[in-house]
Amino acid sequence: MFNRKYVPYSTLIELTLKCNMRCVHCGSSAGYTRKDELSTNEWMNVIRQLSNLKCKLVTLLGGEPFMRKDWDIISREIRDQGMDLTIISNGLCIDDSIIKKLRYLGLYTIAISLDGASPATHDYIRQVKGSFVKCKGVLKSLKEADIPTSVVTTLNKTNLKDLPSLRELLLNKGIAWQIQIGVPIGRFTKDQMLSEEEFYAAALFISSTRKQYTFKELPITGAHCFGYNSSLLPNIMLSPWRGCQAGISGLGIQSDGMIKGCLSLTDEFIEGNIKKDKIEEIWNNANAFSYNRKFTTKNLKNGCKDCKYGKNCKGGCLSVSTSLTNQANSDPYCLYLIEKDMKI
Amino acid sequence: MIEKKQYKRKTVDNKKTEKSNIYKAGRILDINRREINATIRKKKTMLLAGLLIMSLSFLAGFLSNSGPPGYHYGGVSMKDFLEIWRFY
């Protein structure tokens, strides 16, 4: 009877695929510019369209977003349109001039990728010698400039054991820490994926860290891919999991204008291109994002089938699910499922 | 009777396995048993604490003759409700 109105509250923008690193876990296989990346004017148009659609938060990422010379013009437009702005960067090319511009933008947060507690781990994963030292320096400069700063750590077999040392590094620094798992998309190979037992250990680490330290001492959280409905581990994510938000309240725009519900999804989830149609037309298309908008519990598969949390959980992260099982709505990296089967 | 005994033993074994599996996972990142025990949810304690809070709030409400906090009968507080009832 009533048609639900969907609003893209949070939009991820891949500003460019160009990157100055070649990370072993990169899901986008970033490095070189995509063919037909949007021009400055096209991006400005996109930002205005997002504002009209009542978007609240825009996240710029890449590739490396600072590789685009017009990043500050686009960022300024996002702020001028009244939207919050987050930037995700590897930190390698952040210098004093960029920090000065960031200060005046009034960022929601800048998230720097830190994948190890030593040069041996971080530099190996990032494939750039000296990047660990540079990253630490950038974090210090950002804090000195009073810019809200976060760190994102993507877990794989190489850096899992660095978690306790990373905690020491980030403690009492006023830096928020988000931990996520790497999944076999792009350059990330299956052999680097955490086992279910290792995944559970990481969840236990987040939960016990939140128990040991106050949020002021270390604001730590698991990302959306981290555990759904654990009956034993409390406080892993900041808010309860309400199912994949791709196409519900989340939108992803590639640097060539392709639109998906989330940038982590593969090309089969492309809904259209903003060079051809307006975002509003794609977003409000009755058949768009059907994998989430028309979800029913009948879609749940494998371990998620008949799960009591299935209706809200929708089978966990769509990207993890499709990359590991080739099927949607059946994410095997689920704390509830692991605890139920006691696979750990 | 025999069946009941067997069932009880199985439950205990499962719980032991559950805990030992969590301890095993914790060892990967040097999280010791004490930390794990402090972290994991204690369902019975939470349930008892919840019941205690509920009972105390109801008791406090009745003692103050104004009903439990925020609790009203048909838009009036319990105190007013009793006044009306006495009037009639």
Image (cartoon, coloured by chain):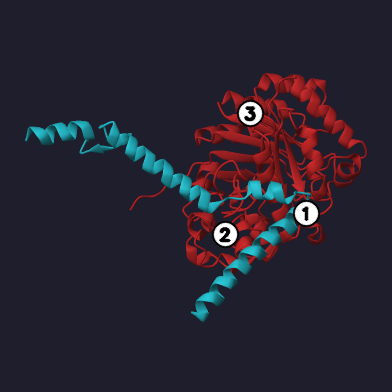
Chain colours: A red, B cyan
Chain for numbered disc 3: A
Give a yes or no on whether discs 1 and 3 share a subunit: no
Residue A255 shows up from this direction: no
Disc 3 versus disc 2: distance between alpha carbons? Answer: 30 Å
The amino acid on which the numbered mark 1 sits, given as a three-letter code, is Arg
Q: Name the residue under label 2.
A: A315
Secondary structure, mark 1, is helix
Asked if A33 appears above or below A70 in the picture, the reply is below
Q: Which residue is drawn at 64% across and 60% down?
A: A321
Farthest-out residue, front = B1
Rendering coords of residue A245 (x, y %): 55, 48
Q: Mark 1 points at which residue?
A: B27
The amino acid on which the numbered mark 3 sits, given as a three-letter code, is Tyr
Q: In this view, does A223 lie to the left or right of A143?
A: left
The image quadrant of residue A323 is bottom right
The amino acid on which the numbered mark 2 sits, given as a three-letter code, is Gly
